[in-house]
Amino acid sequence: MQHDQSILTIKPLEALIITIIILGGISYAIIFAGVVPHVPIMLAIIFLLSYGLIKKVTIKELEEGLIDGAKSGLGAVFIFFFIGMLISSWMASGTIPTFIFIALEVVDGRFFYAIAFFVSSIIGLSIGSSLTTAATIGVAFMSVGSALGLSEAITAGAVISGAFFGDKMSPLSDTTSLASMIVKVDIFEHIKNMIWTTGPAFVISFILFAILSPEEASSNFENINLLKEKLVELEYVHWYSLIPFILLTVLAIKKISAIITLSIGVLSALIIGFVVQKDFGIDKMMNLLFSGFQSNSGLEEVDSLLSRGGIESMLFSISLVLLALSMGGLLFKLGILPALLEGMKRHLNKAATLIAATAGTAIGINFLLGEQYLSILLTGNAYQESYDKAGLERKNLSRVLEDAGTVINPLVPWSICGVFLTGVLGVSTMDYLPFTFFCLLSPLLTIGYGMTGFTITKSVKAAA
């Protein structure tokens, strides 16, 4: 979807009214009425189609808008398929059960949420992928948290906060590369500048998760010992079960294509699965890749922890992503989003308002389109000249793109990250949202810095 593909030129006020109607309707249906997100988004699409017809836009052009929007998400759809297979194959190979066992060995219930946040941060930083982090170590922490009788919402918030810290700060992350590339800033200069906002957000989040970690969780360790014994009894815990994760990490560090990396992660796990699973035939392998791994240990707690994954588990998320991106395609085609961007740019002449508007635009695009990359691309392209005119270094812009673009996507129920994380972690977006401290603090800090001028770098020309 490109900025110049819109076929209508409308006033910013009209675009704002339409946006409020759409977001208001979707938010009310999901938050207050408890409706599955697919339905209000479909109704929003019908509303936009009707608006287009009233504006004399042809059916063919409207259909093109829908298709262009959906096309932009095909890469994410394939990632979803591979992640579904990765989880089920890693269950069969003992990779995730081994992670669970290790976590059960070292986790102290008194600091569980802080540990989940910290470990997820390290893994995310190492591999540069928030979704992969959540789908692997995140699933393990969700299992351990459930066994400890802890809040699934806070556990998910800790995992997501850590995963997106890694996604934001890792030089291996595609969003980090994209944010620096789009505004032509050296990637390491970009990461260095982000420390000013990311560092405080990380420390505050860690402290909050440590405070929330209850002391009484340690009283449930009798159940934990039972789970560990059962995992060993089932022969799911092996050192070689970690090979798929090691391969995935190495390939990610070498910046190999995500599809190739995930494919090798799946294939290596299936090979190990033939060793770990005594009855692991070709037919069972094929079935688990689609339907997910099914544990029949006889212990309900273990079965509920391990029965996960498969392509089928991703279909809800995939259908929602395609619908949300199709809606985004119409917003482009009908000129609604371009009008909003143009309207905001006219009133930007001070650093504080410019940074606040940049953050608001990145957040708004996440809510309108549900797409993380577009929030970075569109906002970055829209505001480059404004930062130059205001005499601000472009690394200020790249930092805001990450502070208010990258980390906001998991907080939107119909976004790519939001629906993926809900499906993988088993916690709704609205439930985990209040506990994603890192994601909530990042945009607040970046706007606060803009208002005070703290760490906002003037360009050399402006300084002179």
Image (spheres, helix red, strand yellow):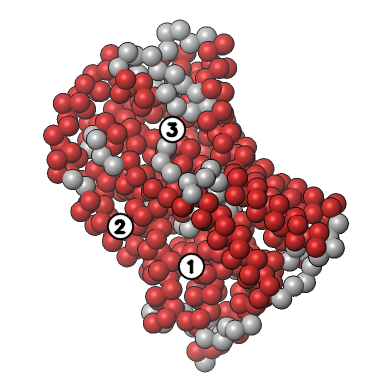
Disc 1 to disc 3: CB gap under 8 Å: no
Q: Is residue 319 above or below residue 364?
A: above
Closer to the eye: label 3 or 2: 2
Relative to 226, say whether 30 is above or below.
below
Rendered view: 291 above or below 415: above
Mark 1 residue crowding within 10 angstroms, few (<14) / some (14–19) / many (20+): many
Three-letter residue code for mark 3: Phe
Q: Position of residue 111 (x, y in %)?
A: 20, 46
Cβ–Cβ below 8 Å for labels 3 and 2?
A: no
* Residue for badge 3: 245
Judged from the image, the secondary structure of the residue bearing numbered disc 1 is helix
Residue type marked 1: Arg
Nearest to N terminus: mark 2 or mark 1: 2
Residue at the image position 22 percent from the left and 37 percent from the top? 107
Label ID, residue 205: 2
Q: Which of disc 2 and disc 3 is earlier in sequence? A: 2
Q: Earlier in the sequence, mark 1 or mark 3?
A: 3
Q: Residue at x 46, y 57 (%)?
A: 407
Name the residue at 52% across, 92% down: 464
Label 3: element kind: helix
Whether residue 122 is visible: no
Which corner quadrant holds the N terminus?
bottom right
Q: Residue furthest front?
A: 33
Q: Which residue sits at x=71%, y=76%?
A: 11
Q: Is residue 152 left or right of residue 262?
A: left
Crowd band around label 2 with a 10 angstrom C-alpha radius: few (<14), some (14–19), many (20+): many
Q: Spatial distance from mark 2 to mark 1, Cα to Cα?
A: 19 Å
Q: Which residue is mark 1?
A: 399
Residue 89 position in % (x across, y down): 48, 24
| Separation of marks 3 and 2 at Cα, in angstroms | 27 Å
- Quarter of image, res 442: bottom left
